[in-house]
Amino acid sequence: MKKNIVCWFEIYVKDIYRARDFYTKVLNEKINNVVETPGGPGIPKFKIATFATGKDSSIVSGSLIEMEGTKNGDEKAVNTIVYFPTDDCTASEKKVIEAGGKILKSKFPVDAPGYCSVCIDTEGNPIGFFSLDK
């Protein structure tokens, strides 16, 4: 199976219930119930509602996330993050540094299961990497 260039996206919101209602109505798609996560060392507590895609791993999916520290949408600035699949988050972080970017949050485990890294590109945009590596 050919990989998608994007594997995950996150839309940061201030009111997850309002946003879930909006996207359900606009997209006419199921969005799973809101789940509140406890957070942990270096990972803030947040609420998440994922777009329902079933078990088809070829479909790019994502979530709505309500989390302290995200900026308010102002209709001009982007308030999303796109995740790219990688075989190794650490190797992708090295490439980001070599290409002039920065590491915002180095490789950390997620419930997906797998690992993520959050980086900043040369234009100041956050981007993420997701891997199943250990």
Image (cartoon, rainbow, N blue to C red):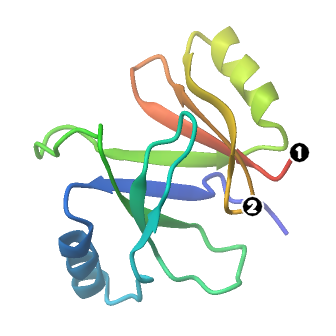
- Above or below residue 82? Residue 104 is above
Other-residue count near label 2 (Cα within 10 Å), few / some / many at <14 / 14–19 / ≥20: few
Q: Amino acid at mark 2?
A: Pro
Identify the element where label 2 is drawn.
loop
Other-residue count near label 1 (Cα within 10 Å), few / some / many at <14 / 14–19 / ≥20: few
Quadrant location of residue 74? top left
Q: Amino acid at mark 1?
A: Lys
Q: Residue 94 location, x and y as percent?
A: 74, 18
Q: Which residue is mark 2?
A: 113
Look at 58% across and 36% down and name the residue there: 41
Identify the element where label 1 is drawn.
loop
Look at 23% across and 70% down and name the residue there: 19
Q: Which residue is mark 1?
A: 134
- Above or below residue 42? Residue 15 is below
The furthest residue to the left: 74
- Above or below residue 63? Residue 42 is above
Look at 60% across and 53% down and name the residue there: 6
- Above or below residue 33? Residue 113 is above
